[in-house]
Each structure stands twice: as C-alpha cells, then as structure tokens.
Image (cartoon, helix red, strand yellow):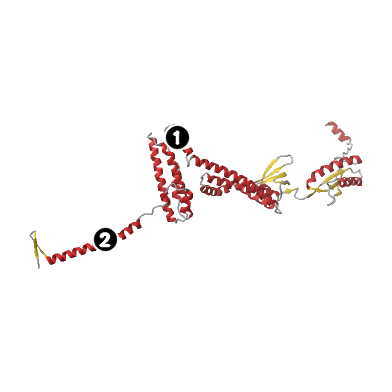
Amino acid sequence: MFRHRFNNLTYDSPGLIRSGVCTLSAIILLTFGAVSFLPAQEKNDSATEKPKPVTTVDPTILQEYLEIIVKPLTLEELTVEAEGWRDLLKENVQQIADVRIAVKKNQGGGEAIPELTETKAKLVDNLNVVLAEMEAKGGEVTSYRKYVSALSGVGVEVADAATAWTLIRSWLVSEQGGQRWLWNLLKFCLILVSFYFVAGIVSRVVQHAAMRVEGFSKLLTNFLGTFVKQAIVVIGLIVALSALEVNIGPLLAAVGAAGFIVAFALQDTLSNFASGLLILGYRPFDVGDSIEAGGVSGTVQSVSLFSTHISTPDNKKMIVPNNDIWKGTITNATASQTRRVDLVFGIGYEDDIDKAKDILEFLVRQHERVLDDPVPLIRVHELADSSVNFICRPWVKSEDYWSVYWDLTRSVKDEFDRQGISFPFPQRDVHLYPASASEAKLLAGN
C-alpha cells in the first residue's frame, strides 16, 4: 500500500486507480450514448421539418413548363406548391402595399409599380396553373381562389398627373399589362369571327343534309339550320370570354341556377316552346302553306320555337304564339296537291236548264288549268226563292285555285249574257187588297 501526501491530503493509490477507471467508463458510455442519440434526433427533426416547394425556385418559370412539372405531383405535393406560390404572391402584394404608402406620403417610388404589377400577374398565372391541377385531382382550392380574387383589386393611387401618366404608359407597354390585354382582345375578336363563319358553314351543311332526309319539311330544315348556327355562336362567345381571362365556370353555374327561376316565371313562354317543338315534329304545315290557325289566315313565312310568322293576303305580318296555333284547329289549304273549286251559279226559273248546264260544262272543259281527273261535277243543286242554282266543282292544282275561281266566274257571266241566260236578283211579290168602306173611312179619319 502506498500513501502520497499532497496539500496535506492523503491518497490511497489503489482507491485512486479504481476511481479513475469508473470515471473513464462513465465518460465513454456518455459519449457513445450521445453519438447514438444524434442520428435519431436528427431523424426526428427531419421528420417534423415542413416540406418545401420545388416549383417556386424560379418564380419566372413559363406556364407551359409549369404545367408539365405539376402533372405527376400528388395532391399533397400540389398543396405544398400552392402554398409556396401563394406566399410569393403575398410578398409581392406586400411590396405593392409598401409602394402605395410611399406614394400617399409623396415619397416617390411609383416607377416600380409596372414591374411589381407584371410580377404579380405572372405569380397569379402560375398559382392558377397549380390550382387547376390540384382541383383536377380532388383538392380544395376555394380558399386559394378567394385569396387571388381579393388581391385582384390591389392598385396604386397617384397624387399627380405625371406619376399617373408614367404608370399608364408603363402598363401599356408592359408584357403583362397592355400587350397582354391587346393580345387577349385580338383573340376574343378572332374567336368570335371564326365561330361565326364556322356556324354559317355548319348551318348550310346541316340544312343540305336535312333536305336529303325523306319526311323532313322545309320548315324543320330551316329551323335546324338556324338552331345549329345560334348554338355554335353561343359556344364561340363562351370560348371568346375565356380568352379574356373570364372565369366562365361560375357564370355557367349561375345560368343553370337561374334557369329554374326563369322556368317558373316564363310558363307561358315555355308552353309556346313546347308547342313549337310539336309543330316542328308533327309538321301540320310548311313554309309557303296557306293556313288558317290561331284566328289568322295567310301564308306561313317561318316558325321559331316560340311563334309562327304568317303573311296575310293583304301583306300584313302576323306573329302568332305557337300555343295558340297548336291548341286550336289548323286548316291547311295547300297540304294536298289538288283542290276542288266550289262555285254556285243561279239562273232564272224561265231560263233553259239544259242550255245553262251545257255552257258550264263547255267553259270548265276548255279551261287549261282544270284537271280531267277527278271529273268536274256540274249539277242542278237547289231551287232557291228567286233562282235555280247550279253547283260547279272542278278540280285544280292547289296553286291554281284562285286563278281558276276568278276565271270561271268571269267567263260564266260573259257567256250567260251572250246566250241570253239571266242572273236573277232577289224578288218579292206584293199583293194589294181593296179595303172595305168602314176601313177606308177609319183610315181617312186618321
């Protein structure tokens, strides 16, 4: 056993050695424990670290490239990217807000507005690309779109005309300002004009094809052509609005919702619409037909989904609701290829009946527009109060009806006068009886 004195202290050598060994062992254990603990701690820190967006590394990335990059991303990854672009947009708008404050304090800085505005437009476009892909994969994008919509009105108030002109001129020549909207307006006009010409071509093709279908009336053919043309023009208008960066989704939803309200408010109009479809389907008349329907007589000019246009014999244009036509009796005078002309001629009781009949048969037979089949009918029809009446019923083509009617009326009058056959007028016999003496005295007293 060795003992050492140091500073008046006595140490036992074996005990000192044992203490050193214990201390060294503890240090080694702590060191290894710390080393083994570090990776786990770093792993936990990396696990809790928030994912960072990758598409925002280059904020000036083109939209077409961004669309390709975000296509394979999952919904969770797209959410991270959307938050990243939203944060960039927030920083940009914050810079615009700082400039607004500076301008209000007349501290200048308005010249930075065009560049900030252009950057803002690019950030909004890129954010919309991510949101569109995110929405396609079932993500909730309402809050993001509301945020973008709320920032759309952020602008700069100017205190002097020079600054205002500088801002306007910078906006007009900027890529995301005047140049962008000029191109949008050109696209809007080009799309409208293109769809209009395409609508005209397709309409003519549809009409030509419908004319070849057996059973299609001219009325239905014209309607199909007009309907197709109007439908294509409406589609073109919607596409053109999208070129102006108008979000047509809410617009279409609003139109659909308003349709139920309009349906109740326009019940009569919808009834005319249904009647118009029935008229086009059952084809009770066609363009150019002479009809009597809805209290109106005339020639059909056209039929829309809500009304029928009829031209009267005195050239007045009558617009009749389809419901009035469909719910009543429709008389179509030109539906058949042939018609019978009904004429009545009266002669005096003292005139020769056989002679009058021969004259009528001759005049009917020699008229070039009277048909041989069916055979014309000429008979003594009625012994009237003042005349013996003949019926004269020749058959003609429908378009010759009134020509034959007027020709025969004139010819019969001329020939009867030449042959000495009279046209009696209404007659009344008046008989006078002499009054008695008392009645004559009574009348004289009055």
Q: x, y percentage for residue 7?
A: 8, 58
- Would residue 263 be visible to someone looking at this image? yes
Residue type at mark 1 is: Thr
How busy is the neighbourhood of tag 2: few (under 14 within 10 Å), some, or many (20 plus)? few
Image side of residue 224 versus residue 61, left or right: right
Which residue is depicted at the point 52% across and 42% down? 183
Q: Is the Cβ of the residue at disc 2 closer than 8 Å to that at disc 1? A: no
Q: x, y percentage for residue 175?
A: 48, 41
Q: x, y percentage for residue 66?
A: 46, 50
Residue type at mark 2 is: Ala
Relative vertical location of residue 30 with respect to residue 109 in this rendering, above or below: below
**Which type of secondary structure does the marked residue at label 1 adopt?**
helix
The front one of 311 and 295 is: 311
How busy is the neighbourhood of tag 1: few (under 14 within 10 Å), some, or many (20 plus)? some
Which residue is depicted at the point 45% across and 45% down? 122
* Extreme-left residue of the structure: 8
Q: In which quadrant will I find the C terminus?
A: top right
Which corner quadrant of the image does residue 386 belong to?
top right
Mark 2 to mark 1 CA distance (whole Å): 64 Å
Identify the residue position indicated by label 2 in the image.
34
- Would residue 154 be visible to someone looking at this image? no
Image side of residue 91 versus residue 380, left or right: left
Image side of residue 291 versus residue 346, left or right: left
**Which type of secondary structure does the marked residue at label 2 adopt?**
helix
Identify the residue position indicated by label 1 in the image.
166
